[in-house]
Image (tube, helix red, strand yellow):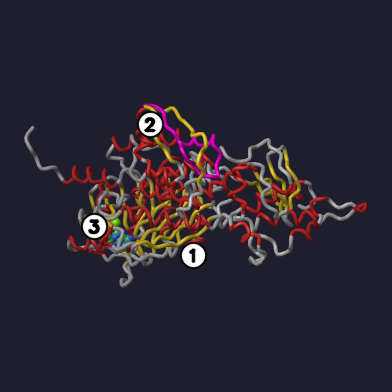
Amino acid sequence: MAIRILTGEVIDQIAAGEVLERPANLVKELVENSLDAGADQVEVEYDDGGRSVTVMDNGRGMNREDLKLSVQRHATSKIQASDDLFRLATYGFRGEALASIAGVSEMSITSRHSDADQGFRLRVRFGQADDAMAVSSRVGTTVQVRDLFANVPARLSFLKSESAEHGQIRSTLKAMALAREDVAFTLRSKGELVAHWPKNQSFNERVRDVLQNQNMFLAQGENKGIRVEAAFSSPRDTQAVNRHLWFFVQGRWVQDRALSVAVMEAYRNLLMHGEYPTAVVRIELDPADVDVNVHPTKAQVKFKNPQDVFRAVSSTIRSALEKAPWLPEKTAEPTVTAFKPKAEGGTTLSFTAPEFRQTQYSQKMFPLAMVREAIADSPKVSSAATPNQPATEFRWQDLQIIGQLHLTYIVAQDSNSYYLIDQHAAHERVVFERLMESFKNGRMDIQNLLIPLTLDLSEAEMQALLNERANFERLGLTLDRLGPETLVVQTMPSLISENSVAEALKKAAHSLHEVGGGGFFERACADVFATMACHSVVRAGQAMSFEQMAQLLQQMDEYPLSSFCPHGRPVYIQKRFSEVEREFGRIT
Ligand code: ADP
Ligand code: MG
């Protein structure tokens, strides 16, 4: 076939394919135009799987000439020179959306410019424009699209079910609403109101309304001029899919795997495998450090320094998570007086007796010898026990212990709830945090093994471990080669039990071998410590005395993350008495 220049019609259809893969893309383009026109009210109606869409705004509108130009390809009011691309203040700049939509649908645009006393309507049927006619209209623009893709059967056949396309449209509109809480959005479908988000909400209010999640927490941070604002869920409030991670760069919704990884990194050791949090992350940085023009639908961006952005996102959320804002708030009333059982028949339950309150803080009560020393000697334990903390702060040690359930859970209460605390998970968390802390401070307490521990490994695993010998040394593990497939461990952290080491090293060898070194170690040490902690602490099925339970609660107060074990399982369940009373029908 000879080379031919494509006709305008074909060019339009190809371009339409790039910008408009699906109806949701069309909705995004139209709403972005409304926002670029300065609208603070946007109404969207969609139907018929998105093949029928109307977007109405109260923006500045277009005059007759602009209306005619708006549907021409590469017609834009937003940039003039290519330099403008690097200081974009608008969503649109390619001048393609309206031209593309006009080529593949029946479209009508009704617009009245804010300076004009009447409006105009332009109709375009599959690329053929009529003359604009004068109509009466309010200031702003309404774009109506019907029969989308009717002239491109191939594209039509790729559309998913009506509900799937509507779902995509809703997600797109949610994203736009999450980026712009100053603008009111109204969504309608099949003649019914789907959602309304009023204008001038706070970020917090908008997030709660859009995601219908009342339990979101806020954080802000900055790293090297990269500003991050985030709303995130507690690690207990998770989903089985990562669809609930929303990212915005310079106010644009983007889908970026690296940013998802940054959020997951912040939740490291707080979630179980396959669990995802909900998060809305907004990033602002110097326009020179990001390129938004790398993708036809502008859904991806390119950062000049992706590492800095990664760190800004993950550390902002991590440091907020470490404050564990979801932990229950303590009531003002002191627990013991509030809950001392009525002395019926003159008996008092033994755990409220003053003797118990006194012995509760005595140390070295823990059943496991190797854990006992290190934890009991911690200077933090005594500081956590001093009573000069603010009364509103929740402390585990202030709970009143009722007893042990099923040899597995500590039962405790305060004035408005009771708690079941998983003894293994709680203890695991404490030991894990202690290991991490002494590792970070470079003050790992180590013990020399009288009888060194030997481990059989494959040659490759062995090499992987020995390559990281210096790093393992920092973890308190001295490793040497004893034979071609035998590793010997000379020292280990004092906090842990010997049988946890083999397990931890085998896991580490495996992942080092699979993933390779290079930055791996920083992340791996958390996993190594998690394994060590898990195999070193009190187990389910082990009886604990009141003193031991009290001491464990006291140790839990040392660390902000003590409501999750290192494997991401919750450490406790809280049940409000009001809930219990409702279940018993005492209150309604
Ligand atoms: P771009 O947004 O990239 O400029 P579009 O094809 O989406 O390209 O729109 C072309 C032009 O039409 C815009 O630059 C703008 O001047 C005008 N326009 C489109 N939609 C609206 C609207 N809702 N209100 C006012 N002007 C609009
Ligand atoms: Mg546009």
Query: What range is drawn magenta here?
Result: 484-504
Q: Nearer the viewer, mark 2 or mark 1?
A: 2
Query: Looking at the picture, does residue 363 appear above or below residue 490?
Result: below
- Looking at the image, tell me whether mark 3 or mark 1 is earlier in sequence order: 3
- Give the residue drawn at x 49%, y 33%: 453
Q: Quadrant of the N terminus?
A: top left
Q: CA distance from mark 3 to mark 2?
A: 75 Å
Tag count: 3
Q: Would residue 302 be found to the left or right of residue 526 on screen? A: left
Q: List the single residue furthest toward the right.
A: 345
Residue 155 at least partly seen: yes
Q: Is residue 490 a member of the stretch shown in magenta?
A: yes
Q: Which mark is residue 550?
A: none
Q: Nearer the viewer, mark 3 or mark 1?
A: 1
| Pointer 2 residue | 461
Q: Which mark is residue 131?
A: 3
The answer as to whether callout 2 falls within 8 Å of ligand 1 is no
- Looking at the image, tell me whether mark 3 or mark 2 is earlier in sequence order: 3
Q: Would residue 563 be found to the left or right of residue 11 on screen? A: right
Q: Would residue 275 be found to the left or right of residue 136 on screen? A: right
Q: Are marks 2 and 1 in contact (CB under 8 Å)?
A: no
Q: Looking at numbered disc 2 in the image, what kind of residue is underneath it?
A: Glu
| Pointer 1 residue | 202
Q: CA distance from mark 2 to mark 1?
A: 53 Å
Q: Is residue 489 a member of the stretch shown in magenta?
A: yes
Q: Looking at numbered disc 1 in the image, what kind of residue is underneath it?
A: Ser
Q: Would residue 514 be found to the left or right of residue 152 on screen? A: right
Q: List the single residue furthest toward the front.
A: 450
